[in-house]
Amino acid sequence: MEDTSDVVDAKYLKEVSRDGAKLIVIASRLEKDQWQLSVQNEYGISSNWLEYFPNSQVAIEAGVQAIEKEGVEPFICTEEFEYLFDENVR
């Protein structure tokens, strides 16, 4: 992954499929040498890291390692988000 210093707003994505679930690992550049990591499930619900990473590659690797270590369940669980599936919410 190329990490150019002149790009201010950059985002790198990696799709990961495990146990029938598709997750997207996202590294978003906040500023030079500061990347935010999130893992998004098929419903658009994201798990976001509070720590920042020095580059996109390190962030993506950390997301993939978390999925491999913890499995997909923590990332696909929608238990706290039932309201998103309510027919009355538009």
Image (cartoon, grey):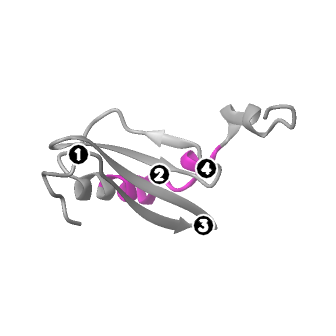
Decide if residue 39 is on the left or right side of residue 33: right
Q: Residue at x 40, y 60 (%)?
A: 13
Q: CA distance from mark 3 to mark 2?
A: 12 Å
Mark 3, other Cα within 10 Å: few <14 / some 14–19 / many ≥20: few
Q: Main secondary structure of the magenta part?
A: helix
In x, y percent, where is residue 45? 58, 43
Which label lies toward us, 1 or 2?
1
Could you tell me the amino acid type at mark 3? Asp
Q: CA distance from mark 1 to mark 3?
A: 35 Å
| Residues shaded magenta | 62-77
Which label lies toward us, 1 or 3?
1
Q: Quadrant of the N terminus?
A: bottom left
**Which residue matches tag 4?**
76
Q: Residue at x 55, y 46 (%)?
A: 74
Which label lies toward us, 4 or 3?
4
**Which residue matches tag 3?**
19
Mark 1 or mark 3: name the one nearer the start of the chain.
1
Q: CA distance from mark 1 to mark 4?
A: 31 Å
In x, y percent, where is residue 17? 53, 68
Q: Are marks 4 and 3 in contact (CB under 8 Å)?
A: no
Mark 2, other Cα within 10 Å: few <14 / some 14–19 / many ≥20: few
In x, y percent, where is residue 75? 55, 48
Could you tell me the amino acid type at mark 1? Val
Quadrant of the image occupied by residue 81: top right
